Amino acid sequence: MDTTTRILIVDDEEVVRLSHLRTLASDHYNVEAALNGTEALRAMEQSPFDLVLLDLRMPDMDGLSVLKAIKQRWPESEVIIITGYPSIDTAKEAVRLGAYDYLAKPVGPDDVIKAATAAMMQKKWTLQTCEAGQDGGQNFKYRFPWEN
């Protein structure tokens, strides 16, 4: 089984896409980029991504519309909104639509790595919990980290 995390960066600014690509490129992350919402959805149709870093304001489709489409069609994909135009209203709407996180630009490399890592940990935990619950919870026992 391939354990490489697939990440899609969606931003209409080339400098932002390249910066995030360089920041996240590693043996554990397969990172691709799209310059708008239409390209992002096309890429998701080819092979869904584990994580999408999504700009809020883009010329063809706004990030909230792309987020909504992703969460409807690929609910297991985590989405982090990254925007240069943060507001309480768009943050609340992004979370309501299923975004894992909402970051305001400028975003440093450490912030991107931390958010991506946390989103992937959440996804892994969610998938494990869902798999554990397939037997109706009969064989599932939560253990605290300090329990043996």
Image: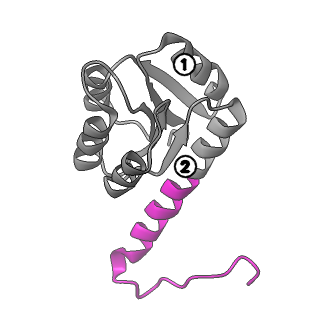
Is residue 74 rendered to the left or right of residue 80? left
**Circle 2 SS class:** helix
Find residue 40 and name its label. none
Name the spot of residue 14 as percent of width and height, x first.
49, 11
Q: Which mark is residue 120?
A: 2
Image location of residue 98, percent across then percent down:
36, 54
57 above or below 3? above
Disc 1 residue type (three-letter): Val
**Residue 4: x %, y % from top left:** 55, 36
Q: Which residue is label 1 attached to?
A: 16
Marks 2 and 1, Cα distance to the nearest angstrom?
21 Å
Colour treatment of the image: one colour
Name the residue at 23% across, 41% down.
Answer: 69
Residue at (44% x, 73% y) in the render: 132
Mark 2, Cα crowd under 10 Å, few <14 / some 14-19 / many 20+, is some
The magenta stretch is: 119-148
Which of label 2 and label 1 is nearer to you?
1
Residue at 51 percent across and 38 percent down: it is 2
Q: Nearer the viewer, residue 106 or 45?
A: 106
Between 45 and 96, the residue placed more toward the observer is: 96
Q: Position of residue 111 (x, y in %)?
A: 67, 39
What residue do we see at 48% from left, 82% from top? 140
Classify residue 25 by image quadrant: top right
Please, is residue 105 above or below residue 121 in the view?
A: above
Quarter of the image with the C terminus is bottom right
Of mark 2 and mark 1, the one earlier in the sequence is 1
Q: Is residue 34 above or below residue 101?
A: above
